[in-house]
Amino acid sequence: MTQPHVLTRRDAAVGVMTFNRPESMNTLDLPMVLAMEQALDALEQDTHVRAIVVTGCDERTFMAGGNIADLNSRHALSHYQDFALVLHRVFRRFEVCAKPIIAAVNGWALGGGAEFMLTTDIRLMADDAKLGLPEIKLGLFPGGGGSQRLMRQIPLCQAKMLMFTGDFLTAAEAVQIGLVNRALPPSQLMTEAMALAHRIAEKSPWALRLLKTSMLQGADMPLSAGLSHEMATISLLLQTEDAHEGCAAFLEKRTPVFKGR
């Protein structure tokens, strides 16, 4: 029986998504992208899930990037219509997902795999893993959002260096330039990712959702507009029961119980 391209499970309030194509190093092609979207649908619709961890199925690979043979078969309009539009739609859905997403990068994250990582909120990486955007070596450049997201997340000169050379980064180097939060021994990666996800899942879902929205939208605004957006969003948050539960718990010296209302 053929295994699903992407597996999902739930551990209390944490959803786990595992890329599950070891024979192809989790290569990104249209079936894989659609499987990722289907898995995200399931975790978004599960009201018990408050945070999501994404990882690869073995120690070799988080996600190896695009299927080169498939790319070589495509030309301008067919690539745009049949693949690029879908890929960008799905990657953007991960980026704007209301539930915080933690990438547990357990192995190689190359090309589209690195581009996918850029859509996640927090990144933990095995200290023997590597990531990179090697498309330039194929006469291409990152086309899954990497040429736009990377320069918004690290200094421009660092982004250009990575994309112009196609060089790989170690986990320690990725942490040093601010692309990854932490490098961890492989044996500790999922333990730490799950512990972090459970800590985040204890917070108010509405506070997390509106904070993430405020940051995503504010990043594309001038500071003055971003501050106005922040004021409106925090005011909206005060309409929720969770906000008043948090304040009441503080005043009563007890642990808040956030219900997502």
Image (tube, grey):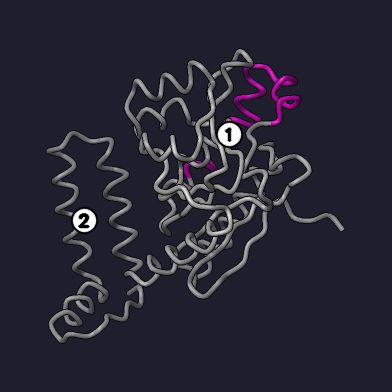
Q: Name which residue lies at 47% across and 42% down.
A: 92
* Dominant secondary structure of the residues highlighted in magenta in the image: helix
Does residue 221 sit above or below 247 in this rendering?
above
Query: Label 1 amino acid?
Result: Gly
Secondary structure category for the residue under label 2: helix
Q: Name which residue lies at 41% across and 32% down.
A: 149
Q: Residues within 10 Å of mark 1 (few under 14, many from 20)?
A: many
- Of the 4 image quadrants, the one containing the N terminus is bottom right
Residue 181, percent from left and from top = 39, 47
| Count of marks, rendered view | 2
Whether residue 94 sits left or right of residue 2 in the image: it is: left
Depth check, mark 2 against mark 1: the one in front is 1
Q: Earlier in the sequence, mark 2 or mark 1?
A: 1
Does residue 39 sit above or below 194 in this rendering?
above
Specify the segment rendered in magenta: 67-92
Task: Name the residue nearer the viewer: 138 or 32.
Answer: 138
Query: Which residue is labeled 1 in the image?
Result: 112
Secondary structure category for the residue under label 1: helix
Q: Name which residue lies at 51% across and 35% down.
A: 170
Q: Name which residue lies at 58% across and 21% down.
A: 135
For this orientation, the residue located farthest to the right is 1
Residue 58, percent from left and from top = 68, 51
Query: Which residue is labeled 2 in the image?
Result: 233
Asked if residue 245 lies in the magenta stretch, the reply is: no
Whether residue 212 sits left or right of residue 66 in the image: it is: left
Query: Label 2 amino acid?
Result: Thr
**Residue 255 falls in image quadrant:** bottom left
Q: Which mark is residue 172?
A: none
Does residue 50 sit above or below 217 in this rendering?
below
Residue 14, percent from left and from top = 50, 67
- Contact, mark 2 vs mark 1 (Cβ under 8 Å): no
